[in-house]
Image (tube, grey):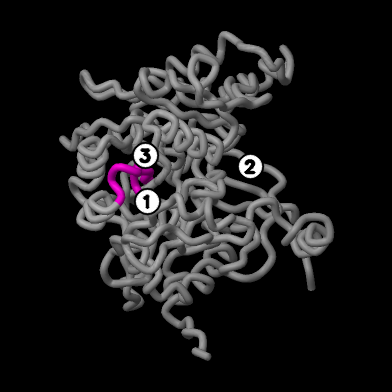
C-alpha cells in the first residue's frame, strides 16, 4: 500500500527530472520514496502524510535556531510587507555585510573587509574563483577530492591519473578544456599540494578548500592543514579560498576559521564563501575577504558578477534575524546536543560490534562504517557504506529523519531539547542492530 509520499514522488517524476530539484533528496543511496515535507517547527518536520519526525537535516544546515524560529519568521513577514524585491540597494544589505565582517573576527584578526551578497553557495564559490583568477592573472585552480563547492563547471572536475595531471570532466556537460583548469589533489596531504605547486606554481590562481570537509561525511582538516595551505598559496603568489558555506556561523560565531583561531591555529584566508546559516533558510550566500581582492569586483574592478535577486530583502531579513539571535548560548546548546547524539550513536554501534567512527568538526558530525575515521576521500569511499540504508530506514521508521546518504553531515539545532534528544537516542539501538544485520551487496 502506498502513502501520500509515494503518490507525490510518482507524480513528481512525471514533472521534475528524477522527481526532485536536488539529487540527494531522491533517496538514491538509501532507497524508497523521499518524504515530501509539508511543515517544520523547532526540531521537527512533518511529511505530506502527516507523520512527524525529529529532524537531523535542518535544511542542510541553515536552521541553526530551529525551524520557523519566531524572530526569523516575523522578520521575513515584515520585509515581505515592504516589497518582495527591488533590484536596488537597501539599508539591510549594508547591515548584513557589516554583521558578517564583524563576526569573522578573533582578537585582532579580521580577514573579511568587504562582502558581496549573492543567492547561492554555488554562485559564491564560482565568483570567488573568478575573482582569484582576475586578481592573479592566472588560470589554474587547486581543489581537493571529496570537497564539494557547488555545481559550476570547473568545480565538477574529477581527479586525473596523477598529481601533474589536470582535471577531467566529472559530469556530463562539462567541457574538457574547462575541467582541465582544475587540479584535483588528495585531501589532508600537504605534500601533494607542494608537489602540484612545484609543477604548476606560476599558473595557479588559488586553492579552494572546505574549512572542514562535510560533503564526504565529516572529515576535519588535520592539525595545521588549513594554515599550511595558506602558507603554500601565499609563498607562490596564489590566493586561499576557504569555503564556509556549510560551517560558516554554524560551528562558531566566526565559522570554522574562528574555531581554529581560538584553538591557536591562526592563518589568513584571502577569500571566504558563506551560505546556509547566513541566509537563515532563505536563498542567500556571500563571499568576503581582503579589500584589495574584493575591490576587483565590478563595478569598481574588472571582474564581473551580477544578480537580479542578489541581496533579496526577504533573504537579508532572515539572515540578519538568524545571526543576531545566534548568541553564545545558542552555540553552547547546539554543541551540547551534538555531543549527546554523537556519543549515543557511537555507543549504539559499538554495542552491536559494528566497525564505525563518528568524526566531528565542532558541532558538525557524521558517521563512517570504518574503524578508523577517514582522513581523505579514498578512505571515505572504502567504508562499508552498504550498512547505511538499513540504519537510515530504521531511524526513519522510529520517527527520526537523517540525511539520506552516509556521505552527509548530521545537523543539530538550538531547538533540539531533552525530549527531542531522548527520541533520537531511543531510536539508535534498533538502527545499529539493523546496520549490523545488513548484508554486503554481491560483487559482479
Marks 1/2: CA distance? Answer: 27 Å
370 is higher (above) or lower (below) than 74 = below
Count neighbours of disc 3 (C-alpha within 10 A) and say few if under 14, some if 14 to 19, many if 20 or more: many
Tell whether position 211 is magenta: yes
Depth order, front residue of 419/249: 249
In what element is the residue under mark 2?
A: strand
Q: Name the residue under label 1.
A: 213
Q: Name the residue under label 3.
A: 205
Dot 1 falls on a residue whose secondary structure is loop
Whether residue 327 sits left or right of residue 44 in the image: it is: left
Tell me what residue is drawn at x 35 percent, y 77 percent: 352
Eye-nearest disc, 2 or 3: 3
Q: How far apart are marks 2 and 3 (CA)?
A: 43 Å
On the rendered structure, is 319 left or right of 210?
right
- Mark 1 vs mark 2, foreground winner is 1
> What residue range appears in magenta?
200-212
Could one spot residue 2 in this view of the protein?
yes
Q: Which of 336 and 9 is in front in this view?
A: 9
N-terminal-most mark, 1 or 2: 2
Q: Label 3, secondary structure: give it.
A: strand
Measured as percent of width and height from the top left, residue 171 is found at 58, 60
Q: Report the mark closest to the observer, 1 or 3.
A: 3
At 66% across and 13% down in the image, what residue appears? 88
- At label 2, counting other C-alpha atoms closer than 10 Å, the crowd grade (few under 14, some 14-19, many 20 or more) is some
How far apart marks 1 and 3 lie (CA) works out to: 21 Å
Q: Is residue 205 left or right of residue 260?
A: right
Amino acid at each position: 500500500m502506498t502513502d501520500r509520499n509515494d503518490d507525490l514522488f510518482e507524480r513528481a517524476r512525471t514533472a521534475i527530472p528524477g522527481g526532485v530539484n536536488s539529487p540527494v533528496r531522491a533517496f538514491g543511496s538509501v532507497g524508497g520514496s523521499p518524504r515530501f515535507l509539508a511543515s517544520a517547527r523547532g526540531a521537527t518536520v512533518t511529511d505530506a502524510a502527516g507523520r512527524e519526525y525529529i529532524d537531523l537535516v535542518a535544511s542542510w544546515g541553515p536552521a541553526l535556531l530551529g525551524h520557523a524560529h519566531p524572530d526569523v519568521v516575523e522578520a521575513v513577514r515584515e520585509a515581505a510587507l515592504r516589497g518582495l524585491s527591488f533590484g536596488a540597494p537597501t539599508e539591510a544589505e549594508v547591515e548584513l555585510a557589516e554583521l558578517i565582517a564583524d563576526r569573522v573576527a578573533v582578537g585582532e584578526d579580521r580577514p573579511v573587509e568587504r562582502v558581496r551578497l549573492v543567492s547561492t553557495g554555488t554562485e559564491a564559490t564560482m565568483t570567488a574563483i573568478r575573482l582569484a583568477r582576475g586578481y592573479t592573472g592566472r588560470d589554474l585552480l587547486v581543489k581537493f577530492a571529496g570537497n564539494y563547492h557547488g555545481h559550476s563547471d570547473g568545480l565538477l572536475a574529477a581527479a586525473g591519473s596523477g598529481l601533474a595531471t589536470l582535471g577531467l570532466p566529472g559530469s556530463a556537460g562539462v567541457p574538457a578544456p574547462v575541467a582541465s583548469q582544475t587540479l584535483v589533489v588528495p585531501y589532508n596531504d600537504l605534500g601533494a599540494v607542494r608537489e602540484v605547486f612545484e609543477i604548476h606554481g606560476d599558473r595557479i590562481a588559488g586553492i579552494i578548500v572546505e574549512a572542514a570537509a562535510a560533503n564526504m561525511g565529516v572529515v576535519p582538516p588535520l592539525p595545521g592543514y588549513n594554515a599550511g595551505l595558506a602558507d603554500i598559496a601565499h609563498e607562490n603568489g596564489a590566493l586561499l579560498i576557504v569555503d564556509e558555506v556549510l560551517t560558516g556561523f554554524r560551528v562558531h560565531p566566526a565559522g570554522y576559521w574562528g574555531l581554529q583561531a581560538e584553538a591557536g591555529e591562526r592563518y589568513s584566508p584571502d577569500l571566504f564563501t558563506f551560505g546556509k546559516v547566513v541566509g537563515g533558510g532563505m536563498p542567500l550566500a556571500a563571499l568576503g575577504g581582503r579589500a584589495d581582492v574584493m575591490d576587483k569586483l565590478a563595478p569598481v574592478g574588472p571582474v564581473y558578477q551580477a544578480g537580479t535577486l542578489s541581496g533579496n530583502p526577504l533573504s537579508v531579513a532572515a539572515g540578519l534575524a538568524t545571526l543576531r539571535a545566534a548568541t553564545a548560548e545558542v552555540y553552547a546548546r547546539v554543541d551540547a546536543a551534538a555531543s549527546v547524539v554523537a556519543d549515543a550513536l557511537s555507543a549504539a554501534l559499538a554495542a552491536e560490534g559494528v566497525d564505525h567512527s563518528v568524526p566531528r568538526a565542532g558541532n558538525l558530525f557524521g558517521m563512517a562504517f570504518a574503524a578508523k575515521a577517514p582522513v581523505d576521500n579514498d578512505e571515505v569511499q572504502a567504508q562499508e557504506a552498504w550498512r547505511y540504508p538499513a540504519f537510515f530506514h530504521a531511524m526513519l521508521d522510529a520517527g527520526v529523519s537523517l540525511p539520506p546518504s552516509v556521505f552527509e553531515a548530521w545537523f543539530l539545532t538550538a531547538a533540539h531539547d531533552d525530549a527531542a534528544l531522548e527520541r533520537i537516542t531511543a531510536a539508535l539501538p534498533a538502527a545499529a542492530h539493523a546496520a549490523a544485520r545488513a548484508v554486503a551487496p554481491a560483487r559482479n
